Image (tube, grey):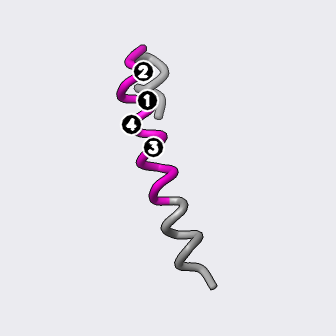
Amino acid sequence: MVEIKRRKTDRRTLYTIRVIKDAFIKLVKEEP
């Protein structure tokens, strides 16, 4: 996560956040 702050690549940051949110939502939906 530190490399994201060093590199100012908004595309990669947004993509990473999107993937993390997607995985988090899947985990929440699987939980009863």
> For mark 1, what is the residue?
13
Question: What kind of residue is marked 3?
Answer: Arg
> For mark 2, what is the residue?
10
Mark number, residue 15? 4
Q: What whole-number distance in Å separates the C-alpha atoms at marks 4 and 1?
A: 5 Å
**SS at mark 4 in the image:** helix
Query: CB under 8 Å between callouts 2 and 3?
Result: no
Residue plotted at (49% across, 21% down)? 5
The answer to whether residue 12 is left or right of residue 22 is left
Residue plotted at (63% across, 85% down)? 32
Q: Position of residue 22 (x, y in %)?
A: 46, 55
Magenta region includes residue 15: yes
Q: What whole-number distance in Å separates the C-alpha atoms at marks 4 and 2?
A: 8 Å
Task: Say which of marks 1 and 3 sits in front.
Answer: 3
Question: What kind of residue is marked 4?
Answer: Tyr
Query: Which quadrant of the view contains residue 8?
Result: top left
Tell me the magenta residue range: 8-23
Rendered view: 18 above or below 8: below
Q: Position of residue 1 (x, y in %)?
A: 47, 34
Query: CB under 8 Å between callouts 2 and 1?
Result: yes
Mark number, residue 32? none
- Dot 2 or dot 3, earlier in sequence: 2
Residue count near mark 2 (Cα–Cα under 10 Å), binned few <14, some 14–19, many ≥20: few
The answer to whether residue 9 is left or right of residue 32 is left
Query: CB under 8 Å between callouts 4 and 1?
Result: yes
**SS at mark 1 in the image:** helix
Q: What whole-number distance in Å separates the C-alpha atoms at marks 2 and 1?
A: 5 Å
**SS at mark 3 in the image:** helix
Q: Position of residue 3 (x, y in %)?
A: 41, 26
Query: CB under 8 Å between callouts 3 and 4?
Result: yes
- Dot 4 or dot 2, earlier in sequence: 2
> For mark 3, what is the residue?
18
